Image: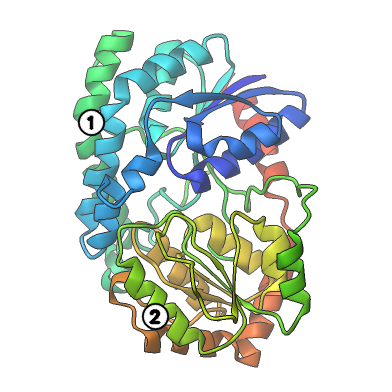
Amino acid sequence: MKIAVVTYGTEGDARPLAALCRALDDAGHASVLLADASTLETAQKLQVKTQALAGDIQGALGTHGAIANVVAQSDRPGAAAQALAAIANTNANSWLRQTVETAEGCDLIVASGLAAFTGLSAADALGVPVIGAGMFPLTPTRDFASPFLPPSRVPRFLNRLSHHFVNAMLWRAFRPAVNAARAEVCGLPARQRMWSDHPMLYGFSRHLVPRPGDWPANASVCGQWIPPAADWQPPAALNAFLVAGEAPLYIGFGSMTGFDAARLREIVVTAVAGRRAVLNPGWSGIDAANLPANFHVVGNTPHDWLFPRMALVVHHGGSGTTHSAARAGVPSVVVPFAGDQFFWADRLARAGVADSAVAGNRLTAEDLARGIAFAGRPEAREKARALGERMRAEDGLACAVEAIERMVKKSV
Protein backbone atom coordinates (compact mmCIF):
# COMPACT_ATOMS: atom_id res chain seq x y z
CA MET A 1 0.00 0.00 0.00
CA LYS A 2 0.91 3.63 -0.49
CA ILE A 3 0.21 5.52 2.72
CA ALA A 4 0.29 9.27 3.45
CA VAL A 5 0.70 10.13 7.13
CA VAL A 6 -0.05 13.74 8.11
CA THR A 7 0.43 15.38 11.49
CA TYR A 8 1.37 18.71 12.99
CA GLY A 9 2.74 19.47 16.43
CA THR A 10 5.96 19.13 18.37
CA GLU A 11 8.60 16.46 17.88
CA GLY A 12 6.64 14.41 20.40
CA ASP A 13 3.80 14.31 17.89
CA ALA A 14 5.94 13.53 14.85
CA ARG A 15 8.45 11.04 16.31
CA PRO A 16 5.95 8.22 16.97
CA LEU A 17 4.55 8.60 13.46
CA ALA A 18 8.06 8.50 12.00
CA ALA A 19 8.48 5.17 13.79
CA LEU A 20 5.14 3.99 12.39
CA CYS A 21 6.18 4.97 8.86
CA ARG A 22 9.45 3.06 9.22
CA ALA A 23 7.52 -0.01 10.40
CA LEU A 24 5.09 0.29 7.48
CA ASP A 25 7.98 0.58 5.03
CA ASP A 26 9.66 -2.45 6.58
CA ALA A 27 6.40 -4.39 6.14
CA GLY A 28 6.52 -3.74 2.39
CA HIS A 29 4.39 -0.61 2.18
CA ALA A 30 5.43 2.86 0.97
CA SER A 31 4.83 5.76 3.35
CA VAL A 32 5.38 9.51 3.34
CA LEU A 33 5.23 11.67 6.48
CA LEU A 34 4.01 15.29 6.33
CA ALA A 35 4.83 17.40 9.41
CA ASP A 36 6.52 20.61 10.55
CA ALA A 37 10.08 20.88 9.21
CA SER A 38 11.62 21.15 12.69
CA THR A 39 10.09 17.81 13.74
CA LEU A 40 11.23 15.65 10.83
CA GLU A 41 14.76 14.81 12.01
CA THR A 42 13.81 11.40 13.42
CA ALA A 43 11.98 10.44 10.21
CA GLN A 44 14.93 11.50 8.07
CA LYS A 45 17.36 9.50 10.19
CA LEU A 46 15.06 6.50 9.73
CA GLN A 47 15.14 7.12 5.95
CA VAL A 48 11.40 7.73 5.86
CA LYS A 49 10.17 9.85 2.98
CA THR A 50 9.09 13.26 4.30
CA GLN A 51 7.50 16.55 3.31
CA ALA A 52 7.53 19.73 5.39
CA LEU A 53 4.19 21.42 6.01
CA ALA A 54 3.89 25.20 6.22
CA GLY A 55 4.17 26.68 9.69
CA ASP A 56 6.57 27.26 12.56
CA ILE A 57 5.82 25.17 15.62
CA GLN A 58 8.85 26.49 17.49
CA GLY A 59 7.58 30.02 16.96
CA ALA A 60 4.19 28.99 18.31
CA LEU A 61 5.96 27.53 21.33
CA GLY A 62 8.07 30.63 21.91
CA THR A 63 7.64 32.97 24.83
CA HIS A 64 5.00 35.04 23.03
CA GLY A 65 3.57 32.18 20.97
CA ALA A 66 0.15 30.60 21.14
CA ILE A 67 1.19 27.52 23.10
CA ALA A 68 3.22 29.60 25.54
CA ASN A 69 -0.02 31.35 26.44
CA VAL A 70 -1.62 27.97 27.16
CA VAL A 71 1.29 27.08 29.47
CA ALA A 72 0.93 30.39 31.29
CA GLN A 73 -2.85 29.86 31.64
CA SER A 74 -2.94 26.09 32.19
CA ASP A 75 -6.02 26.44 34.42
CA ARG A 76 -8.11 27.52 31.41
CA PRO A 77 -9.09 24.47 29.30
CA GLY A 78 -10.57 26.71 26.59
CA ALA A 79 -7.22 28.38 26.03
CA ALA A 80 -5.81 25.15 24.59
CA ALA A 81 -8.55 24.89 21.96
CA GLN A 82 -8.10 28.52 20.93
CA ALA A 83 -4.31 28.24 20.68
CA LEU A 84 -4.35 24.99 18.75
CA ALA A 85 -7.00 26.28 16.37
CA ALA A 86 -5.02 29.46 15.73
CA ILE A 87 -2.06 27.45 14.46
CA ALA A 88 -4.08 25.04 12.32
CA ASN A 89 -6.49 27.64 10.98
CA THR A 90 -3.68 29.84 9.71
CA ASN A 91 -2.37 26.98 7.58
CA ALA A 92 -5.58 25.11 6.72
CA ASN A 93 -5.56 25.87 2.99
CA SER A 94 -1.86 25.14 2.54
CA TRP A 95 -1.97 21.90 4.54
CA LEU A 96 -5.04 20.59 2.73
CA ARG A 97 -3.70 21.43 -0.72
CA GLN A 98 -0.35 19.76 -0.01
CA THR A 99 -1.93 16.70 1.60
CA VAL A 100 -4.30 16.16 -1.34
CA GLU A 101 -1.44 16.50 -3.83
CA THR A 102 0.81 14.15 -1.87
CA ALA A 103 -1.88 11.55 -1.17
CA GLU A 104 -3.03 11.37 -4.79
CA GLY A 105 -2.77 7.69 -5.72
CA CYS A 106 -2.38 6.55 -2.11
CA ASP A 107 -4.42 3.71 -0.65
CA LEU A 108 -4.73 5.23 2.82
CA ILE A 109 -4.32 8.45 4.79
CA VAL A 110 -3.34 8.41 8.47
CA ALA A 111 -4.35 11.67 10.16
CA SER A 112 -3.09 12.96 13.50
CA GLY A 113 -2.36 16.00 15.63
CA LEU A 114 -3.30 19.51 14.55
CA ALA A 115 -3.49 18.27 10.95
CA ALA A 116 -6.12 15.62 11.71
CA PHE A 117 -8.99 17.54 10.12
CA THR A 118 -6.75 18.20 7.13
CA GLY A 119 -6.15 14.49 6.67
CA LEU A 120 -9.81 13.66 7.11
CA SER A 121 -10.81 16.27 4.54
CA ALA A 122 -8.15 15.07 2.08
CA ALA A 123 -9.56 11.55 2.40
CA ASP A 124 -13.04 12.93 1.62
CA ALA A 125 -11.67 14.65 -1.47
CA LEU A 126 -9.76 11.62 -2.75
CA GLY A 127 -12.26 8.97 -1.73
CA VAL A 128 -9.67 6.88 0.12
CA PRO A 129 -9.84 5.25 3.58
CA VAL A 130 -8.61 7.26 6.54
CA ILE A 131 -7.41 6.17 9.98
CA GLY A 132 -6.90 8.54 12.89
CA ALA A 133 -3.82 8.21 15.09
CA GLY A 134 -3.45 9.54 18.62
CA MET A 135 -0.94 9.51 21.44
CA PHE A 136 -3.68 10.09 24.02
CA PRO A 137 -7.31 8.88 24.09
CA LEU A 138 -9.86 10.88 22.12
CA THR A 139 -12.64 8.30 21.76
CA PRO A 140 -15.45 9.00 24.28
CA THR A 141 -15.70 6.60 27.22
CA ARG A 142 -17.26 6.33 30.66
CA ASP A 143 -13.98 5.06 32.12
CA PHE A 144 -12.23 8.43 32.38
CA ALA A 145 -12.71 12.09 31.52
CA SER A 146 -11.31 13.85 28.48
CA PRO A 147 -7.52 14.19 28.76
CA PHE A 148 -7.93 17.94 28.20
CA LEU A 149 -9.78 18.35 31.51
CA PRO A 150 -8.30 18.07 35.02
CA PRO A 151 -8.89 14.41 36.03
CA SER A 152 -9.91 15.23 39.60
CA ARG A 153 -12.52 17.84 38.66
CA VAL A 154 -14.87 15.74 36.52
CA PRO A 155 -17.44 13.55 38.34
CA ARG A 156 -17.37 9.99 37.04
CA PHE A 157 -20.94 10.16 35.74
CA LEU A 158 -19.87 13.02 33.45
CA ASN A 159 -16.83 11.24 32.00
CA ARG A 160 -18.35 10.34 28.64
CA LEU A 161 -20.07 13.69 28.31
CA SER A 162 -16.75 15.46 28.96
CA HIS A 163 -15.26 13.88 25.82
CA HIS A 164 -18.18 15.05 23.70
CA PHE A 165 -17.93 18.52 25.26
CA VAL A 166 -14.21 18.91 24.56
CA ASN A 167 -14.47 17.44 21.05
CA ALA A 168 -17.34 19.82 20.26
CA MET A 169 -15.35 22.75 21.62
CA LEU A 170 -12.35 21.82 19.46
CA TRP A 171 -14.49 21.33 16.34
CA ARG A 172 -16.19 24.69 16.91
CA ALA A 173 -12.77 26.35 16.99
CA PHE A 174 -11.47 24.55 13.89
CA ARG A 175 -14.65 24.30 11.80
CA PRO A 176 -14.78 27.68 9.99
CA ALA A 177 -11.24 27.43 8.61
CA VAL A 178 -11.56 23.72 7.82
CA ASN A 179 -14.78 24.26 5.89
CA ALA A 180 -13.35 27.27 4.05
CA ALA A 181 -10.32 25.18 2.99
CA ARG A 182 -12.55 22.28 1.94
CA ALA A 183 -14.52 24.58 -0.35
CA GLU A 184 -11.57 26.52 -1.78
CA VAL A 185 -9.08 23.66 -2.24
CA CYS A 186 -11.32 20.69 -2.99
CA GLY A 187 -14.78 22.02 -3.77
CA LEU A 188 -16.13 19.95 -0.88
CA PRO A 189 -19.32 20.80 1.02
CA ALA A 190 -19.06 22.19 4.53
CA ARG A 191 -19.28 19.75 7.42
CA GLN A 192 -21.54 20.66 10.29
CA ARG A 193 -20.57 17.72 12.50
CA MET A 194 -17.16 16.42 13.44
CA TRP A 195 -15.97 13.09 11.99
CA SER A 196 -16.66 10.27 14.43
CA ASP A 197 -16.88 6.91 12.63
CA HIS A 198 -13.36 6.48 11.23
CA PRO A 199 -10.99 3.92 12.83
CA MET A 200 -8.58 5.13 15.50
CA LEU A 201 -5.15 3.78 16.40
CA TYR A 202 -3.61 4.77 19.71
CA GLY A 203 0.13 4.70 20.33
CA PHE A 204 -0.04 4.33 24.11
CA SER A 205 0.20 1.39 26.47
CA ARG A 206 -2.72 -0.61 27.82
CA HIS A 207 -0.71 -0.89 31.04
CA LEU A 208 -1.21 2.86 31.58
CA VAL A 209 -4.61 3.18 29.90
CA PRO A 210 -6.52 -0.12 29.66
CA ARG A 211 -8.74 -0.19 26.58
CA PRO A 212 -12.23 0.92 27.69
CA GLY A 213 -14.93 -1.70 27.27
CA ASP A 214 -17.35 0.84 25.77
CA TRP A 215 -15.05 1.79 22.89
CA PRO A 216 -16.09 0.77 19.36
CA ALA A 217 -14.32 -2.16 17.72
CA ASN A 218 -12.41 0.16 15.35
CA ALA A 219 -10.49 1.85 18.21
CA SER A 220 -7.24 0.00 18.98
CA VAL A 221 -4.70 0.48 21.79
CA CYS A 222 -1.39 -0.63 20.32
CA GLY A 223 1.37 0.32 22.74
CA GLN A 224 4.06 2.97 22.39
CA TRP A 225 5.43 3.64 18.91
CA ILE A 226 9.19 3.81 19.38
CA PRO A 227 11.80 4.34 16.65
CA PRO A 228 14.33 1.49 16.32
CA ALA A 229 17.23 1.88 18.72
CA ALA A 230 19.83 4.11 17.15
CA ASP A 231 23.52 3.28 17.00
CA TRP A 232 24.21 6.06 19.48
CA GLN A 233 27.23 6.64 21.67
CA PRO A 234 27.15 9.07 24.62
CA PRO A 235 29.53 12.03 24.68
CA ALA A 236 32.59 11.28 26.79
CA ALA A 237 31.59 13.88 29.38
CA LEU A 238 28.17 12.29 29.92
CA ASN A 239 29.66 8.83 30.19
CA ALA A 240 32.21 10.06 32.70
CA PHE A 241 29.49 11.71 34.79
CA LEU A 242 27.35 8.57 34.84
CA VAL A 243 30.16 6.28 35.99
CA ALA A 244 31.40 8.73 38.62
CA GLY A 245 28.69 8.02 41.16
CA GLU A 246 25.20 6.75 41.92
CA ALA A 247 22.40 6.92 39.34
CA PRO A 248 21.36 10.56 38.91
CA LEU A 249 17.99 12.23 38.55
CA TYR A 250 16.91 13.28 35.06
CA ILE A 251 15.21 16.68 34.71
CA GLY A 252 13.70 17.91 31.45
CA PHE A 253 10.51 19.61 30.32
CA GLY A 254 10.62 18.88 26.59
CA SER A 255 9.09 21.53 24.38
CA MET A 256 7.38 23.40 27.21
CA THR A 257 7.99 27.13 27.43
CA GLY A 258 6.10 30.25 28.45
CA PHE A 259 6.72 29.84 32.18
CA ASP A 260 9.13 31.71 34.49
CA ALA A 261 12.31 29.83 33.57
CA ALA A 262 14.47 31.58 36.18
CA ARG A 263 12.01 30.66 38.93
CA LEU A 264 11.84 27.04 37.75
CA ARG A 265 15.65 26.85 37.69
CA GLU A 266 15.79 27.99 41.30
CA ILE A 267 13.09 25.47 42.29
CA VAL A 268 14.96 22.62 40.61
CA VAL A 269 18.31 23.46 42.19
CA THR A 270 16.74 23.79 45.64
CA ALA A 271 14.67 20.60 45.42
CA VAL A 272 17.51 18.48 44.04
CA ALA A 273 19.43 19.45 47.19
CA GLY A 274 22.87 18.38 46.05
CA ARG A 275 21.89 15.08 44.43
CA ARG A 276 23.50 14.13 41.14
CA ALA A 277 21.28 15.31 38.29
CA VAL A 278 21.19 15.34 34.48
CA LEU A 279 19.42 18.42 33.08
CA ASN A 280 18.11 18.78 29.55
CA PRO A 281 16.95 22.41 29.15
CA GLY A 282 15.03 21.56 25.95
CA TRP A 283 12.99 24.54 24.78
CA SER A 284 12.30 25.68 28.34
CA GLY A 285 14.67 28.65 28.35
CA ILE A 286 16.23 27.46 31.63
CA ASP A 287 19.71 28.99 31.93
CA ALA A 288 22.09 26.05 32.15
CA ALA A 289 25.14 28.21 32.87
CA ASN A 290 26.79 28.22 36.29
CA LEU A 291 24.76 25.37 37.73
CA PRO A 292 26.08 23.60 40.85
CA ALA A 293 28.66 20.89 40.22
CA ASN A 294 26.14 18.12 40.92
CA PHE A 295 24.39 18.96 37.62
CA HIS A 296 25.39 17.70 34.19
CA VAL A 297 23.74 19.39 31.19
CA VAL A 298 22.81 17.42 28.07
CA GLY A 299 21.11 18.13 24.76
CA ASN A 300 18.84 15.74 22.88
CA THR A 301 19.71 12.26 24.15
CA PRO A 302 17.80 9.06 23.29
CA HIS A 303 15.42 8.36 26.14
CA ASP A 304 15.67 4.61 25.64
CA TRP A 305 19.40 4.85 26.30
CA LEU A 306 19.37 7.46 29.07
CA PHE A 307 16.32 6.76 31.24
CA PRO A 308 17.27 3.22 32.34
CA ARG A 309 20.47 4.75 33.74
CA MET A 310 18.54 7.29 35.87
CA ALA A 311 17.21 6.93 39.42
CA LEU A 312 14.03 8.77 38.42
CA VAL A 313 12.75 11.11 35.72
CA VAL A 314 11.37 14.61 36.36
CA HIS A 315 9.34 15.60 33.30
CA HIS A 316 6.35 17.54 31.98
CA GLY A 317 4.05 14.58 31.38
CA GLY A 318 4.00 14.49 27.59
CA SER A 319 2.77 11.15 26.28
CA GLY A 320 6.12 10.14 24.79
CA THR A 321 8.24 11.03 27.83
CA THR A 322 5.68 9.47 30.17
CA HIS A 323 5.87 6.20 28.27
CA SER A 324 9.64 6.26 27.92
CA ALA A 325 10.13 6.79 31.65
CA ALA A 326 7.63 4.06 32.55
CA ARG A 327 9.07 1.69 29.95
CA ALA A 328 12.55 2.25 31.42
CA GLY A 329 11.30 0.93 34.75
CA VAL A 330 12.04 4.06 36.78
CA PRO A 331 9.67 6.28 38.82
CA SER A 332 8.57 9.72 37.64
CA VAL A 333 8.04 13.16 39.08
CA VAL A 334 5.55 14.90 36.79
CA VAL A 335 5.29 18.68 36.47
CA PRO A 336 2.41 19.17 33.99
CA PHE A 337 1.87 22.48 32.22
CA ALA A 338 -0.92 22.09 29.65
CA GLY A 339 -3.11 19.82 27.56
CA ASP A 340 -3.01 16.06 28.17
CA GLN A 341 -0.03 16.28 30.54
CA PHE A 342 -2.33 16.32 33.58
CA PHE A 343 -3.97 13.13 32.31
CA TRP A 344 -0.61 11.31 32.07
CA ALA A 345 0.44 12.63 35.49
CA ASP A 346 -2.73 11.07 36.90
CA ARG A 347 -2.07 7.77 35.09
CA LEU A 348 1.42 7.49 36.57
CA ALA A 349 0.10 8.32 40.03
CA ARG A 350 -2.59 5.63 39.66
CA ALA A 351 0.16 3.15 38.74
CA GLY A 352 1.99 4.03 41.97
CA VAL A 353 5.14 5.18 40.16
CA ALA A 354 4.69 8.92 40.79
CA ASP A 355 3.28 11.16 43.50
CA SER A 356 0.30 13.40 42.78
CA ALA A 357 1.42 16.18 40.47
CA VAL A 358 1.49 19.93 40.99
CA ALA A 359 1.01 22.14 37.93
CA GLY A 360 4.13 23.89 36.68
CA ASN A 361 2.73 27.37 37.23
CA ARG A 362 2.07 26.58 40.93
CA LEU A 363 5.11 24.40 41.66
CA THR A 364 7.31 25.10 44.69
CA ALA A 365 10.64 23.60 45.71
CA GLU A 366 8.80 21.78 48.50
CA ASP A 367 6.38 20.22 45.99
CA LEU A 368 9.23 19.03 43.78
CA ALA A 369 11.22 17.70 46.75
CA ARG A 370 8.16 15.77 47.93
CA GLY A 371 7.77 14.20 44.47
CA ILE A 372 11.44 13.24 44.40
CA ALA A 373 11.17 11.67 47.86
CA PHE A 374 8.11 9.64 46.79
CA ALA A 375 9.91 8.41 43.67
CA GLY A 376 12.80 7.25 45.84
CA ARG A 377 10.66 4.95 48.00
CA PRO A 378 11.33 1.22 47.58
CA GLU A 379 7.67 0.49 46.80
CA ALA A 380 7.59 3.12 44.03
CA ARG A 381 10.80 1.76 42.55
CA GLU A 382 9.48 -1.82 42.61
CA LYS A 383 6.19 -0.81 40.98
CA ALA A 384 8.14 1.08 38.31
CA ARG A 385 10.38 -1.91 37.66
CA ALA A 386 7.37 -4.22 37.23
CA LEU A 387 5.52 -1.72 35.03
CA GLY A 388 8.57 -1.30 32.81
CA GLU A 389 8.88 -5.05 32.37
CA ARG A 390 5.25 -5.30 31.22
CA MET A 391 5.53 -2.36 28.85
CA ARG A 392 8.75 -3.62 27.26
CA ALA A 393 6.88 -6.81 26.34
CA GLU A 394 4.54 -4.78 24.10
CA ASP A 395 5.24 -4.35 20.39
CA GLY A 396 3.21 -1.27 19.59
CA LEU A 397 4.45 -0.90 16.03
CA ALA A 398 3.72 -4.49 15.03
CA CYS A 399 0.24 -4.12 16.50
CA ALA A 400 -0.34 -0.87 14.57
CA VAL A 401 0.87 -2.26 11.24
CA GLU A 402 -1.35 -5.33 11.63
CA ALA A 403 -4.33 -3.16 12.55
CA ILE A 404 -3.79 -0.86 9.55
CA GLU A 405 -3.57 -3.80 7.15
CA ARG A 406 -6.71 -5.34 8.68
CA MET A 407 -8.69 -2.08 8.64
CA VAL A 408 -7.82 -1.25 5.04
CA LYS A 409 -8.65 -4.76 3.86
CA LYS A 410 -12.01 -4.51 5.63
CA SER A 411 -12.79 -1.14 4.00
CA VAL A 412 -12.13 -2.34 0.44
Q: Is residue 5 above or below residue 254?
A: above
Tags 1 and 2 touching, CB below 8 Å: no
- Amino acid carrying label 1: it is Arg
For disc 1, the neighbor class at 10 Å (few under 14, some 14 to 19, many from 20) is many
Residue depicted at 57% across the width and 48% down the height: 203
Determine the secondary structure under disc 2: helix
For disc 2, the neighbor class at 10 Å (few under 14, some 14 to 19, many from 20) is some
- Amino acid carrying label 2: it is Ile
Q: Is residue 130 left or right of residue 402?
A: left
Q: Is residue 101 at least partly visible in the picture?
A: yes
Q: Is residue 213 at least partly visible in the picture?
A: no
Q: Position of residue 342 (x, y in %)?
A: 38, 66
Measure the alpha-carbon separation of dots 1 and 2. 41 Å
* Label annotation for residue 175: 1
Nearest the eye: 228 or 203: 228
Q: Position of residue 27 (x, y in %)?
A: 77, 30
Quadrant the N terminus occupies: top right
* Label annotation for residue 282: none
Looking at this view, name the residue that lies furthest to the front: 290
Q: Which residue is mark 2?
A: 267
Quadrant the C terminus occupies: top right
Q: Quadrant of residue 340?
A: bottom left
Mark count? 2
Which sits earlier in the primary sequence, circle 1 or circle 2? 1
Q: Is residue 107 left or right of residue 93?
A: right
Q: Nearer the viewer, mark 1 or mark 2?
A: 2
Residue depicted at 67% across the width and 74% down the height: 310
Q: Position of residue 217 (x, y in %)?
A: 53, 43
Q: Is residue 164 above or below residue 24?
A: below
Residue depicted at 59% across the width and 17% down the height: 107
Nearest the eye: 6 or 190: 6
Q: Position of residue 101 (x, y in %)?
A: 47, 11
